[in-house]
Amino acid sequence: MSAKGSQREQRDRDVGAAGPLERELRAAVRGEVSFDAASRALATMDASNYRRVPVGVVAPRDADDVAAALAVCRARGVPVVPRGGGTSIAGQATGVGVVLDFTRHMREIVSLDPGTRTAVVQPGVVLDDLRAAAGAHGLTFGPDPSTHSRCTLGGMIGNNSCGSHSVAWGTTADNVHELDVRTYGGERLRLGQGLDTLPPRLRDGLRDLVDGDLARLRTGFPELPRRISGYALDELLPEKHADVARAFTGSEGTLGVLTEATVRLVEAPRARALAVLGYPDESAAAEAAAGLLPYGPLTVEGMAADLVRDTAGLPGGGAWLFVEVGGESPAAARAHADTLVRAADGTVDRLVVTDPAAQRALWHVREDASGTATRMPDGSEAWPGWEDCAVPPARLGAYLRDFRALLGEHGLRGTPYGHFGDGCIHVRIDFDLLSADGVRRFRGFSEALAGLVVAHGGSLSGEHGDGMARAELLPRMYGPEMVRLFERFKDLWDPDGGMNPQVLARPARLDENLRFEVLPRRPVDVEFGYPQDGGDFGAAVRRCVGVAKCRDTSSGSGVMCPSFRATGEERHSTRGRARLLHEMLAGEVVTDGWRSEEVRDALDLCLSCKGCRSDCPVGVDMATYKAEFLHHHYAGRPRPAAHYAMGRLPLWLRGTAALRLPAAANAAAGVRPLAALAKRAGGIAPERTIPPLAAEPFTRWWRRRRNRTSGDGRTVLLWPDTFTNYLTPSVGRSAVAVLEAAGLRVIVPPRPVCCGLTWVTTGQLDGARSVMRRTLRTLAPALDAGTPVIGLEPSCTASLRTDLPELLGSDDARAARLAASVRTFAEALEEYAPDWTPPRIDRPVVGQTHCHQHAVLGDAADRRLRERAGLTGELSGGCCGLAGNFGFERGHFAVSAACAEEQLLPTVRRAPEGAEVLADGFSCRTQLGQLGDVRGRHLAEVLAEGLGGGGAP
């Protein structure tokens, strides 16, 4: 029987046994016990190439819950896998049996003592939360992986994580003091230095293991700063005071379950400076890195030009070192950086940055590399697997040359980057993991690279652990005798083999359990074109590699993912939804395909804000995936009422305006029983107020003034979107006034046009296509004349740029022409009236950049226009939470309001007196009015008022 077949049979047996196991866990555990398909699907993968299907997920509330769950699983012989943020890159955060999810409840910083510089934390504490708490005392936790905004301390201890500052503060093991652990056998252990506090069985066994192989343990581990592979048995040597806590760190959940940790904190520099050093190529940068270490840097990070898509802001060169230094003051940090820069050999250019915001912008380039590296410059896919080998820093240059040569020998491509000061390299490689030949090449390259790393005196893992990616190759690094010691060590802690089996000790083969093997081999029939993924929906879903930037809830971190920020549930993150779509395509856990209720329920709270399209390092576009799913899910059967009411809103508004019924509709909406009936029939949240319709649509106003002479400059077509036309025509009138004041000649389409957005967001894609094609026919003369199209509503403008060409694809060449001709209001003024001087408003502004503006259109031109008009201040990030039809749909009000409270409403409440509240999107203005009793205005309205009028006559 094949390995794949035996795995499926085991999964079937596990699912069959889940009934009594689930019941017993529910009786024993106070936290959540989830055996449903969606919960299992969400835990099948981490950020690696691997996939293992659990039978259930338990979210323990405390250490007693952990002990109770272990007892039930032990009695039934079910394995257990501890899981934190799920960002592991070697597969160790996946597993069969029961997954213990520590991100829901065990997130408490129990205590923090500035005097002893220690903190006691539960395993689910997010690193940035600990750093923020420590920062109030001038302290920090030294290790800082690029996933610091969502990785957990438990996961860091499990993997012995490092991060960019390890040259100064070491690995997680270097910063661990004591650990509270529960073993699979039910023992509660307090681990620190010394064996005497351990139970006799474990104490005597460890002593025998060490005493029986002292020579091997003293000589069998390479001396280098980033040796993470295998178990750290050398930490048990007498001269190292038998540090059991350090030996446990990096054990990848295979020895026991961490329930609490006492960690060491370090003093954070009062000021920092960042030196970015440009070198001619990667090898030159690598060879220079070790020479900078004597100058006491905090970081020495490296990357080459083939990783960086946009080199703006970087000094010249083909590769760069990011070298951070500290000081007691900004001047001292700058002086430290200048000294280091003068000592740097071989640079072609250099830059020293002291402004914190500018430093953060540069660090984002480095931190997003784990995502951006998953796509080669030509758009092809690249994968982890050899993500973090480490060699002695002095050998890094030679190793990289040999590594590049080995890639060439195997016909592979990769983009190295990483911790050059520690000799640790990250890389994503364009393995073909979908075909048998590709998997064989993956294995052959892995075996060859393991030999190369060992030849350079290195470690197979320098940060993320071995997991299922490299553990099979540990004999090549350590030899068979040391690997047998690893197995003995594992057995002493876990004689029943219940902790995370097939990881580290007696591992699975590195080409087993690949997450791609369950996916369909042929592209599925879909509606959107997915131009960045070769038209393949499966490839689009594969974009999510699990780095989980969508789980970052820190303020100001962008738009993605507003629903996760509101609920904190994995299924409402971009990653969670992508995982469910992956399992939908696989068909093993989520078995109903496009009819899946699990996927539908997870997508229900997706706001279609498109924040992930820009904020996700790999460009996942969940708004498009949601539209695609809804189209198939409801094909041939009734839809929710909101899809008919709000998905076809332009039709209803057009008919109401044509029949001259706005006044009657507004009056009816003001009668509470009638409004309640209308909301119930339309699937609208009862908490919402129905927005009033304009007495005169913008297009009717335009026809009344069509004989008026417009500007004599460049002709531009103003797009009368549904929201501007029927709900807020003052925005359109104001835009005409400003555009004409700038000397532009404004025209408006002769017949109604629509971008199709409301049909798209509700997954009515056949209808969306019809609407879009009718629009293209109407605009054909303007497109033939090369007339630019100006959008006022960000969501509609973004839809013209992305949804329309991606849905119509190659069927209509005019789609790409329209997308290329679209400009925002600010872009049009900047491009077609560059010499125009806007009126000076000279007021502070608050508000929020529209999600679609942030994700698709960009706001650089808007920022420059506001600056020229004297509108000072920054708009907040995040999402208003209304997001078109989302916030109006029944059942969404609470999440919609929570999204608004995340950034927008607090920002407006803190606004200085006289501040202008800017909100270019109708949804944003509506949310401000209904939840904050604040009137927001479009930038066009503010500028038109500054011209001396509220809009064109």
Image: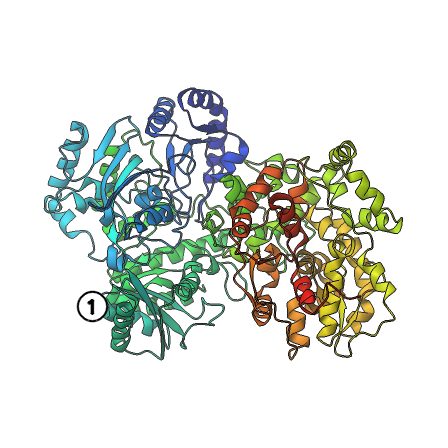
Q: Is residue 663 visible?
A: yes
Q: Amino acid at mark 1?
A: Pro
Specify few, some or many for label 1: CA neighbours under 10 Å numbering under 14, 14-19, or 20 or more. few
Q: Which of 746/811 is in front? A: 746
- Residue 749, position in %: x, y? 82, 64
| Colour setting | rainbow
Q: Residue furthest right?
A: 659
- Residue 789, position in %: x, y? 73, 67
Image point (56%, 53%), residue name: 611
Vertically, is 575 above or below 337?
Answer: above
| Residue 295 as seen in the image, left or right of residue 701 | left
Vertically, is 179 above or below 725?
Answer: above
Q: Which of 265/902 is in front? A: 902
| Residue 562 as seen in the image, left or right of residue 953 | left
- Residue 759, position in %: x, y? 73, 49
- From the image, which quarter does the C terminus lie in? bottom right
Q: Which of 873/596 is in front? A: 873
Question: Which residue bears the numbered disc 1?
Answer: 294
Could you tell me which secondary element the residue under label 1 belongs to?
Answer: helix
Q: Based on the displayed image, in which of its 4 quarters is residue 755 positioned?
A: bottom right
Q: Is residue 465 visible?
A: no
Q: Based on the displayed image, in which of its 4 quarters is residue 589 positioned?
A: top right
Image point (48%, 60%), residue name: 372
Q: Based on the displayed image, in which of its 4 quarters is residue 203 positioned?
A: top left
